[in-house]
Image (cartoon, coloured by chain):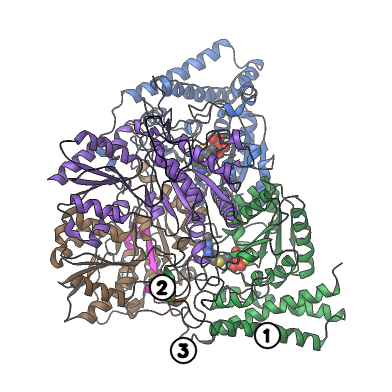
Chain colours: A green, B blue, C brown, D purple
Amino acid sequence: MISDDTRVQFYKDMVRIRTYEAALQRDYHADKTPQWDIGAGLIPGEMHLAAGQEPVAVGLCANLEQDDAITGPHRPHHLALAKGVDMKAMTAEIFGRVTGLCHGKGGHMHLFDPANHFSCSGIIAQGMPVAVGQAFAFNRKGTDNVAVAVAGEGAANQGAFHEALNLAAMWKLPVIFIIEDNDWAISVARDTATPIKDGSLRAAAYGMPSARIEGNDVEAIYEACKIAVDRARAGGGPTMLEIHTVRLWGHFEGDAQAYRGDELQEATERDPIPAYEKRLRAAGLLDDEAVAAIQAEAQAEVEAAIAFAKESPEPKPSDAYLHVFA
Amino acid sequence: MISDDTRVQFYKDMVRIRTYEAALQRDYHADKTPQWDIGAGLIPGEMHLAAGQEPVAVGLCANLEQDDAITGPHRPHHLALAKGVDMKAMTAEIFGRVTGLCHGKGGHMHLFDPANHFSCSGIIAQGMPVAVGQAFAFNRKGTDNVAVAVAGEGAANQGAFHEALNLAAMWKLPVIFIIEDNDWAISVARDTATPIKDGSLRAAAYGMPSARIEGNDVEAIYEACKIAVDRARAGGGPTMLEIHTVRLWGHFEGDAQAYRGDELQEATERDPIPAYEKRLRAAGLLDDEAVAAIQAEAQAEVEAAIAFAKESPEPKPSDAYLHVFA
Amino acid sequence: MTATIDASTRRVTTAKAISEAIAQEMRTDPNVFVMGEDVGPYGGIFGSTGGLFDEFGATRIIDTPISETGFIGAGIGAAVEGMRPVVELMFVDFFGVCFDQIYNHMAKIHYESGGNVKVPMVLMMAVGGGYSDAAQHSQCLWASFAHMPGMKVVAPSNPYDAKGLMISAIRDDNPVIFMFHKGVMGLPWMAKNPRSIGPVPEEEYTVPIGKAAVAHEGSDVTVVSISMSVQHCLDVAEELEGDVSVEVLDLRSLVPLDREAILASVAKTGRLVIVDEDYKSFGMSGEVIATIADHDPSMLKAPVQRVCYPDVPVPYARVLEYEVLPTRDKIKAAIAKVMG
Amino acid sequence: MTATIDASTRRVTTAKAISEAIAQEMRTDPNVFVMGEDVGPYGGIFGSTGGLFDEFGATRIIDTPISETGFIGAGIGAAVEGMRPVVELMFVDFFGVCFDQIYNHMAKIHYESGGNVKVPMVLMMAVGGGYSDAAQHSQCLWASFAHMPGMKVVAPSNPYDAKGLMISAIRDDNPVIFMFHKGVMGLPWMAKNPRSIGPVPEEEYTVPIGKAAVAHEGSDVTVVSISMSVQHCLDVAEELEGDVSVEVLDLRSLVPLDREAILASVAKTGRLVIVDEDYKSFGMSGEVIATIADHDPSMLKAPVQRVCYPDVPVPYARVLEYEVLPTRDKIKAAIAKVMG
Ligand SMILES: Cc1ncc(C[n+]2csc(CCOP(=O)(O)OP(=O)(O)O)c2C)c(N)n1
Ligand SMILES: Cc1ncc(C[n+]2csc(CCOP(=O)(O)OP(=O)(O)O)c2C)c(N)n1
Ligand SMILES: [Mg+2]
Ligand SMILES: [Mg+2]
């Protein structure tokens, strides 16, 4: 049984992420006028937002400790925030500031926070083997930490997926593989990319326990992740979870999504946050006032982070030459 | 029911291959004295022989036509011979002669015979996607040909395996994936490389029919391949077969196989040719005389091929600069 | 099969020039097909396959799973069986997940087979930075391909060349790497040099692979470049007109490398600047210089200036990225330096 | 932490020197471990891990499945968490199945993280041909690694350097590519130059990464090389003694490239020959030449001679392979030519 406090916390955490993504979306587009230019504005470059996928991050990370590791994909903000990455430093990074997590060198697809063992990469599925190595290190060092690799359902068709799962299973390492199935890999629909409906079947290829979690429900996700994380901590080896979630917005900002057709409307209706709010209201855990307070708190934190980013200095041009080698 | 003639033919084909591999082994080592030197002698370089794996090649290829394709692995001779590649041209290639299949440029891991749609590659599992593309071409051209990718059980842990199977299944292409499980990938035992005992389980990850064939029995292999090939020809899509076979000799010539221990003796006892001979004798299809005749015929053909190779001229040194571009 | 351009020639983007070239070849040759991620209804992330899906449908314009080794290998298999695939790798930066198929198979099969097997295949891909896409989505990497034998490596700088080179590439019996810089595509959603939209004849025509173009004639200094950077070089050459006479040599391909054109130009000018958005060391600039040094180092009246991407990964922040990108200012400074 | 060699120093193979270096570091640092295909009981296909399994067992000497992306990625993950993996890629030729982990992750994480994350990892691999292993098992490809920023690239030519460089590599906080040519390993089953067995002190010592060695002093011509080819160059230099005074510069690493050493030697000799078993174009030779041309092309009294692997895949037949390999005869001819 998940406690009432935890349930409200789940809601708060999801609202916090959504508020963050919405604010980034706003600021990303704010100064790309008059002609929309991907490289212009205070936040330049590609921008992959995770609206709709908050339950995955929140349900997963509620099971993790600071010294557990996550390797995330190109769409990483929800995971970073839920894992405890400092919002200010992360935002400053996305704004390319010297106060950023990576002093402006990484950008939104390359957030590295060694204190929280969080990293991500823009190359599909390639974070998965890295998580296996982190789990290997935890195992050799005798800690009970776990490593989590998060990747999209599109990424699960990449060779690295196969190699990483097999290695983790063979070596019985404390890894959890989370596949965020949001039905799309850019414009390529899940069901045109693999003939199987239930991706968790793939774990059988490695003798690995697995499950597919439908419903994009933070509590179900939490419970499934709990089993996986507990097993990994106890030395029981890896687990693979395919979590059916939803991509509410474009693949990246600027994606007109013409390819989605009616599905886009249907997807919008699967927004997990109003649904969860409704459940918590029905359970008497939330009311208008509480919701407003939660939203206001989230908004305040996010705007403070953005303000911090905007006020932070840019890196010195010559910093470009630093850090090629340690 | 497999006809008696076919059964005897299977035996002949297996003896032919074994005779070939044994003769190559003999000639490979013949002139590497006094100090054994991998680069010396009439046959230089690495040499991966397939003794023990004849049932796979023969059982498979009995189902194939000339315009069906095979992409083979680094251990390719049994497949090439069974597929109909000219023994003389192939042998000349292995001896590095200008009369060789590839005029001496390819060598034993790179045998290309477009007339028989046979090719192989020394990079593990990378022939598998190529076979998918050949099947794609057959499909688009409206033929009923099939493409077969053959790879070792070690190769099945490589990312390319995963990508190729998924593509073939998604596109329902006429491909047969044959995994030759000979228990070893050089010195790495199968069961230390993946936790699953039955590799055919992996096909479930792509919704693909599959089977594991135990016993290294040419007839069982033939029957299983027949189902797969018929399905592919009829437009029913790909099949994956893991065939348990045996590597009677070293991974490559010169491999002392210290890592095998007792298993080597046990493997020797699983030699498929004496076993099949015994069955055919029991069925009254072979007797001493027939066996001797078959062996003699094979030996004669093989020695003629080797003689052809030895008598053939070497390429001109300047040929090295040809064929970089068409 | 060249084409003439006059005032009436319509002006299109490089993206349109590429997709038109593919469409025209597809109309005449049923063996041509397109395969890659988001090449179907989306039309290619950088527009290289715009409109093709509508005309040719899903059997010939094929969206793939994110399985580059799988589908590039499939392209090779189809090519070996006589088809002429045009395969897209979305960004060159991803070549590390599939390079084996590219250089150990696509590029070598013809040679390994002693000339018996052909692999007529185009592998196209987006390259380049300048819009804050950071370390894994902004590289050029043409030298990484050009270093490996057996594939041609093409990178047009303008729409006219793009169409003609793409038609040549599709008709070529060899594997051709076709690199389009995002900045030359003329995308509506990316800042661009006006040179990314230009006159392109409607008919089919070819531009030969392996011939450099003197994009701007001059006599004081030779500036050798390729792809997007050529546009900057031309801007600089025009700006300096009357002051320094700059010859801009657009290599158009690294393999084959038009060494004669390099030698001819440097023989005339005696001064060499190389502008390259790929990493500096062990790359294009060294090979261009070696072309001179192999022949006659005394052709050079001054030290060579290399305006290349320094040996650092691509940083994200704009101020950092533009510090390391080859820009007009750096090209001008290099010309000034080499002029002494 | 250098070591001295005298007549009493035992002579060992390069393979032994490497495995000894790893063993000594493993004894003092529990974070060092070895991972790769056949590195366990087999001891590495080319002997680089001989004896380690017996001493350290299966928890620290780890045989992997044939999953290079998987285990190199795992090495990176372990390094990020503070371990010091020594990972073997069996042949450099296979880098195409795993290059993304190498150049997009291993080499870039430190930079992308703004210096916050270190990846102290050694990725070792066999390179080189000369024994008819054909197109997919005979390449050197060091320039392909050296072209990408963020990793050091080391390739020793003899046992002494191999041990000292391996110890440096393991202790380095950066990713280091450690390339051992099969021909320098001193394997009992491969023809070898006697230089592949040499004096190696038993104690631990380091050879600094990034410093070239003047392997043979001379004043008429500079011959720049690396790895196995250095042995050929030394043979030639000794043979020509009294006739031509040949300076042989063993680069020992391409990244960092010891440009000062190149300039210093060419300043002295004015003549340059480059010997490189990697493909010629867009590679090491061009960068060495560019180092001169950037500085002062007039240092060169004659056209440069490049004795490199021409831009063809490696053919199988011995007569074909030796036609294209850099051999002593070709080096001699190049020296003769550059001497005029
Ligand atoms: C190896 C590689 N191939 C292609 C891409 C381009 N790409 C970036 S995101 C993406 C789609 C990813 O889909 P999925 O894994 O389902 O994640 P999602 O975007 O849905 O979160 C693609 C194809 C890449 N970054 N890396
Ligand atoms: C990508 C790649 N990794 C490693 C190798 C080296 N290698 C050659 S054969 C082999 C073992 C192959 O085992 P398996 O696939 O079971 O085939 P078998 O040799 O048993 O026939 C290895 C590791 C290679 N050729 N390619
Ligand atoms: Mg997705
Ligand atoms: Mg095997």
Q: Which residues are magenta?
A: C167-190
- Distance of label 3 from label 2 (alpha carbons): 31 Å
Q: Are marks 1 and 2 on the same chain?
A: yes
| Relative horizontal placement of residue C274, taking residue A240 as reference (left or right) | left
Q: Which numbered marker is on residue A318?
A: 2
Q: Chain of mark 1?
A: A
Of the two numbered discs 1 and 2 on the same chain, state the one appearing first in sequence: 1
Q: Nearer the viewer, residue D170 or D125?
A: D170
Dividing the picture into quadrants, the one containing residue D134 is top left
Q: Which numbered marker is on residue A299?
A: 1
Amino acid type of disc 1? Gln
Q: Chain of mark 3?
A: A
Dividing the picture into quadrants, the one containing residue C185 is bottom left
Indicate the quadrant containing the N terminus of chain B: top left, top right, bottom left or bottom right. top right
Rendered residue at 44%/80% (across/down): C188
The reply to whether callout 1 and callout 2 are in contact (CB within 8 Å) is no
